[in-house]
Image (spheres, rainbow, N blue to C red):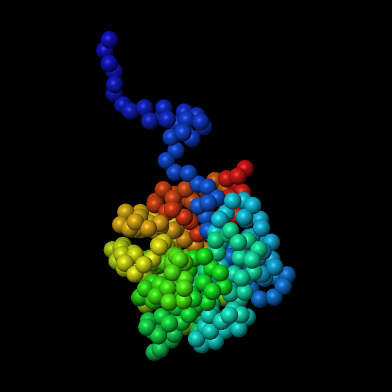
Amino acid sequence: MESKMNYSRHRRLRSSKAMRSIVRETTLQPEDFIYPMFVVEGEQIKNEVPSMPGVYQLSIDQLKEEIEAIVSLGIKAIMLFGVPSEKDEQGTGAFTHEGIVQKAIRSVKATFPELLVVADTCLCEYTTHGHCGVIENEDVHNDLSLPLLAKTAVSQAEAGADIIAPSNMMDGFVITIRNALDANGYEHIPIMSYAVKYASSFYGPFRDAADSTPQFGDRKTYQMDPANRLEALREAASDVEEGADFLIVKPALAYLDIIRDVKNNVNVPVVAYNVSGEYAMVKAAAQNGWINEKELVLEKLTAMKRAGATLILTYFAKAAAEWLNE
Ligand code: PBG
């Protein structure tokens, strides 16, 4: 018999739902997600963020109700952002015992001891100028900002945070925070560093949610230039060397190449931050009936994992977990 091998039959492995499911290379599960949440002072407060439908600023009581729901969906971790009612030049609200995040962490951990609480460690929500550190000569001063970040991290660990996530992009923030945590008996608390964080227009809606828009200038002297790829590898390498236990790449969707590069170059878990602007775009299109939200969201979250993310910080965590559990 003559063989008539002429082309590859790729469609054999796509022929049915079951066939596709046994050869699938990337899967999503609720454990992959970290749910970012915004906490405010007060009681019974649930303010929807206008540019982020379905995302709320919550008072602690409401936060706990929401957490009850997400825990039952199988989500294992949240990230907390505080929106204080008062701000000052130094951002002292970030590191006081009675700070909004410190109170929220204590309350959440008392009710949900198993849930992992990741504390975003930054100053921009707490400073009057909206920048992520101490201002000198119209710019954020690197070394003067580090001790404030260290204080913030220690106060968050003291309140019961399970993971510290410094996001202000100062050089040396990982080693500074590592040393401060260790010196205060928190050597067991991991650091999830926003190692590769671009100066991105995709953060706009977050700044509404967290009330953290810079009051002058921008963040381009501390966050990265979106044009750069090798710089991401330098940022990743130095953070690992300084002791980071996880690395965040942010934003995610327009930076899948960077997620893959970082994944190929480090041996710690890589976390993709699917940021506010990425969320807002999908929501706007869905509200117009222009896309299928469920399919699109699951597709893009899968793409982030395929690119190399072990975990995904996403405002879609709750919805995606619901869809995956269906
Ligand atoms: C704090 C911080 C920001 C985000 C996370 N942590 C804002 C910023 O850098 O301006 C953005 C998250 C998002 O857009 O979803 N520095």
261 with respect to 159 (left or right): left
Q: Quadrant of the C terminus?
A: top right
Viewer-closest of 128 and 105: 105
Q: Residue at x 61, y 76 (%)?
A: 100
Q: Looking at the image, which residue is at 53% across and 51% down? A: 31
Residue at the image position 42 percent from the left and 40 percent from the top: 25
In the image, what residue occupies the spot 52% across and 83% down? 91
Quadrant in the rendering for residue 35: bottom right
Q: Quadrant of residue 137?
A: bottom left
In the displayed structure, would residue 108 be above or below residue 41? above
Q: Quadrant of the N terminus?
A: top left
* Any part of residue 168 in sight: no
- Residue 54 lies, in percent from the top left, at 63, 60
Q: Position of residue 112 (x, y in %)?
A: 63, 61
Of all residues, the one furthest to the front in this rendering is 185
Q: Is residue 184 left or right of residue 43?
A: left
Q: Nearer the viewer, residue 116 or 55?
A: 116
Q: Is residue 2 visible?
A: yes
Q: Residue furthest bottom?
A: 137
Horizontal placement of 143 versus 299: left or right? left
Residue furthest left as drawn = 2
**Residue nearer the viewer, 74 or 293:** 74
- List x then y, in percent, for residue 99: 59, 79
* Residue 95 position in % (x across, y down): 53, 80
Q: How many marks?
A: 0
Residue 139 against residue 62 in the figure, above or below? below
Q: Residue furthest top?
A: 1
